[in-house]
Image (cartoon, grey):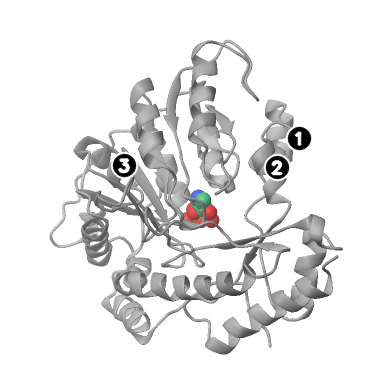
Amino acid sequence: MKIPYFRAALSDAEIAEVTDTLRSGWLTTGPKVKRFESLFAETVGVRHAIAVNSCTAALHLALEAVGLKQNDLVVVPTMTFAATAEVVRYFDATSVFVDCSYDFNMDPDYLETTILNVRNSKPVAGLKPPYGRLKAIIPMHYGGYCCDMHAINQIAANHGVDIIEDAAHAFPAYFRSNITNDWVHAGTSSRIGCFSFYANKCITTGEGGMAVTDDEQIAERIRIMSLHGMNNDAWKRFTAQGSWYYEIVAPGFKYNMTDIAAAIGLHQIKQAEEFRISRQKIAERYTERFKQLSALEPPPNDPQTRIHSWHLYALRLNLDQLTIDRAVFIEKLKERGVSCSVHWMPLHLHPYYRQTFGLGEGMFPIAEREWRRLVSLPIYPSMTEDEIDYVIEVVQDVTERFSK
Ligand SMILES: Cc1ncc(COP(=O)(O)O)c(C=O)c1O
């Protein structure tokens, strides 16, 4: 049996809607993007949602909207994907890395210490004095398991710093600080939240992203900058209702979502919770089996305070109990037809960040220790029962065969 790492779940509804878009003759930003934005805003419970062509674009526009400038500082996790930190560099600003907790999310204590060190001009990994202005924090909800936003929001408020949430993995995902509180959707408790609809995300539009906010001015700025800095509703300029006249108010970007992409999103969004439940069921089955094997550590979960999106199922190997390392473990699964991935090598270990900021080994011990034993298993709604059983069987066989 061959189990791909991911296979998108697309129904006839998505295909019919894309066909309808193609037949309509209106391919780029238009009525379907507007509908998708409204539906998204309503679903996560915010006032504004701006659809763009990637989460990376949403993060870039968010930093622009809060006024990030050259030499400013933005705190980001080292345990994240390239996009979270690269957008900071677009401004020639500096990403200040922080370590993660056991759950791979930004560690609030580490965050607080880092901010205090910046404020007091004490040594901070990767920074040379004099330090720039601390402008923002970008927490990222690893695999769709929400960060401790209560603590992070508190720290940001104490220091007057903006939060932009990288919620690329978190649609839908929720948190609450205790069981008597209401659930809060990831990406909505801070100034701006950014979501991804990349091909293998919780819902997809092929490529796509969304920035959400309750702040009218921020929303306006993001919208304008997502389309060349043209003033409002310039996307309508070729329609009967629109006007040929527009003004350029800033040198913007070309980040608008197409109606073709939104056509897919309009039907994916309706299935988002159903997809989440399918992934949760797979995660529960994996965990049920893998917790019985001492060489494996299933991902943490706390259903009292988190509703996990289960975008990732990041299994940890107890390498001291195995005769093989993580790379060989993945190779053995592959030989049996099970494709896996790794999320991620921490950013500070990549050549660009080593060479540019003098970062490297020994600086963020939790991320460095944990990533070496990580394996992301296939987890997606289109997996069949047989495929789920097969992944469990192969992981168990390989683990038992190579256990000490
Ligand atoms: C944590 C995280 N942030 C941001 C992104 C960027 O998303 P996109 O591909 O939509 O730009 C990704 C993509 O994988 C991601 O994993």
Residue labelled with disc 3: 222
Q: Quadrant of the C terminus?
A: bottom right
**Residue 25 circle label:** none
Residue labelled with disc 1: 361
Q: Residue at x 48, y 58 (%)?
A: 301
Residue 302 in the image: x percent, y percent?
Answer: 44, 56
In this rendering, is residue 374 above or below 382?
above
Callout 1 secondary element: loop
Q: Residue at x 72, y 26 (%)?
A: 358
Circles 1 and 2 in contact, beta carbons < 8 Å: yes
Horizontal side of 361 relative to 81 (left or right) equals right
Horizontal side of 214 relative to 374 (left or right) equals left
| Label 2 vs 3, first from the N-terminus | 3
Callout 2 secondary element: helix
Residue 270 in the image: x percent, y percent?
Answer: 29, 73
| Label 1 vs 2, first from the N-terminus | 1
Nearer to me, 202 or 389: 389
Residue 344 in the image: x percent, y percent?
Answer: 64, 52
Amino acid type, residue under disc 3 in the picture: Ile
Q: Is residue 228 visible?
A: no
In this rendering, is residue 347 above or below 26?
above
Residue labelled with disc 2: 368
Q: Quadrant of the N terminus?
A: bottom right
Q: Residue at x 59, y 72 (%)?
A: 378
Amino acid type, residue under disc 2 in the picture: Glu
